[in-house]
Image: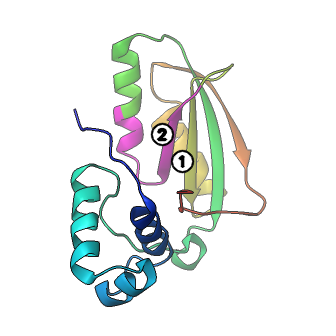
Amino acid sequence: MKQDFIIGTLETRILGALQRDASISMADLAQEARSSTATCWRRIRDMEEAGVIGAPVRIVDPARVGRGMDAFCQVRMKAQNAGARAAFQKAMEAEPSIVEVYSISGDWDYLLHLVVRDIADLESILMNRVHELDCVASASTLFVLRRVKHTTAIPV
């Protein structure tokens, strides 16, 4: 088990800068964080090893790659046993258009976020990947009309 990592002022400045632009040069990061490049590099490495930050990625605009439709699907399971949950989660991980899967509380068991080409694409994924599973009792889909806010930055 990883130890808790203490986020200090320097780490907060580094995380803020990296979340705005993961491609920032180490020299520019050091200047923005008000530290040396060597110290910034060590702190980034320490945060990676502690699991605080993962690999740097580039954010893709879904609409510009032909995936301009977002939908959320609430799923109710027939059973809550470990086997059913594992089978469901494995099936969801195998579908690239399902970009997020949350186990949730309340009337539904899971919330799926799908990024698809169009309604036909959504229907195919729901019918062939979600509803086909024996462990799924029911599902309800919400269509996104417009993204009002979307961020990957976590407040630090």
Q: Is residue 94 magenta?
A: yes
Instruction: Determine the CA span between mark 1 and mark 2.
Output: 6 Å
Q: Which circle marks residue 128 in the picture? A: 2
Taking 29 as reference, is 146 above or below it?
A: above
* Residue in the picture at 71% in, 63% down: 149
Local SS, label 2: helix
Taking 128 as reference, is 156 above or below it?
A: below
Point out residue 11 in the picture as x, y percentages from the top left corner. Answer: 39, 63
Q: Amino acid at mark 2?
A: Asn
Toward the viewer: 35 or 24? 35
For residue 24, say whether it is visible. no
Local SS, label 1: helix
Q: Amino acid at mark 1?
A: Ser
| Residue marked by disc 1 | 124
The count of marks equals 2
Is disc 1 surrounded by few (<14), some (14 to 19) or many (20+) residues within 10 Å?
few
Point out residue 56 in the picture as x, y percentages from the top left corner. Answer: 33, 69
Contact between labelled residues 2 and 1, with CB atoms less than 8 Å apart: yes
Taking 32 as reference, is 88 above or below it?
A: above
Q: Quadrant of residue 96?
A: bottom left
* Residue in the picture at 37% in, 42% down: 93
Q: Which circle marks residue 6 in the picture? A: none
Residues in magenta?
A: 90-104
Toward the viewer: 119 or 54? 54
Taking 71 as reference, is 62 above or below it?
A: below
Toward the viewer: 147 or 57? 57
Point out residue 107 in the picture as x, y percentages from the top left corner. Answer: 69, 19
